[in-house]
Amino acid sequence: MRFRAQATADGGILNEAALMTEEFTAANDRRGSQRFRISAPLTILAGDSEIQAYTRDLSNRGVYFYLSLTDSGLIDRDFEFLVELPAEITLSSSCRIRCRGRLVRKEITSRNLTGAGVAAEILDYSILREAFSPA
């Protein structure tokens, strides 16, 4: 069964964040939480290096993100990353989240062979601060 999330006139339970979700397959989906399709900046902390990436989708339990193929080799089984969540997802102001993740899989993206997609489980996270938003 395929469906698109809708918002109610007053925002209700379904809100603007639900509008950002793309169509997704509910049948045979084993995810325990809603996944938001959003392209948000993500920074992987690998030793002294900071690797820039961006999300494809995100939930409170996992993330899928894109980065360069050469940088994907720097991601070990467990790693830390920062993600900037926009106000549309937090339903208040944008914020920065620090996460500890566990690698689930890496794959070469089909669009161009110089990129990689990474799926990771989010083990824990903490809210660092409101993200800076230029006026």
Image: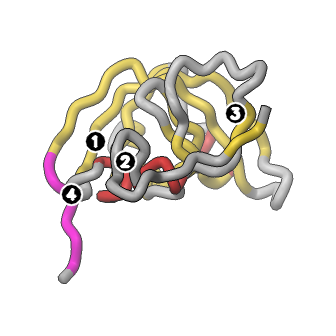
Which kind of residue does numbered mark 4 sit on?
Ser
| 62 on left or right of 2 | left
Q: What residue does disc 2 label? A: 83
Task: Name, please, the residue furthest toward the bottom.
Answer: 135
Q: What residue does disc 1 label? A: 97
Distance CA(mark 2)–CA(mark 1): 5 Å
2 and 1 marks in contact (CB < 8 Å):
yes
The residue segment tinted magenta is 129-134
2 and 4 marks in contact (CB < 8 Å):
no
Measured from the top left, where is residue 134 in percent x and y? 22, 78
The numbered mark, 4 or 3, whose residue comes first in the sequence reads 4
Depth check, mark 4 against mark 1: the one in front is: 4
Which kind of residue does numbered mark 3 sit on?
Lys
| Figure quadrant of the C terminus | bottom left
The numbered mark, 1 or 3, whose residue comes first in the sequence reads 1
Depth check, mark 4 against mark 3: the one in front is: 4
Which kind of residue does numbered mark 1 sit on?
Ile
1 and 3 marks in contact (CB < 8 Å):
no
Give the number of the disc on residue 93. Answer: 4
Using the rendered view, name the quadrant where residue 75 is placed: top right
Give the number of the disc on residue 106. Answer: 3
Which kind of residue does numbered mark 2 sit on?
Val
The numbered mark, 2 or 1, whose residue comes first in the sequence reads 2
- Give the residue at x 34% y 32%: 99
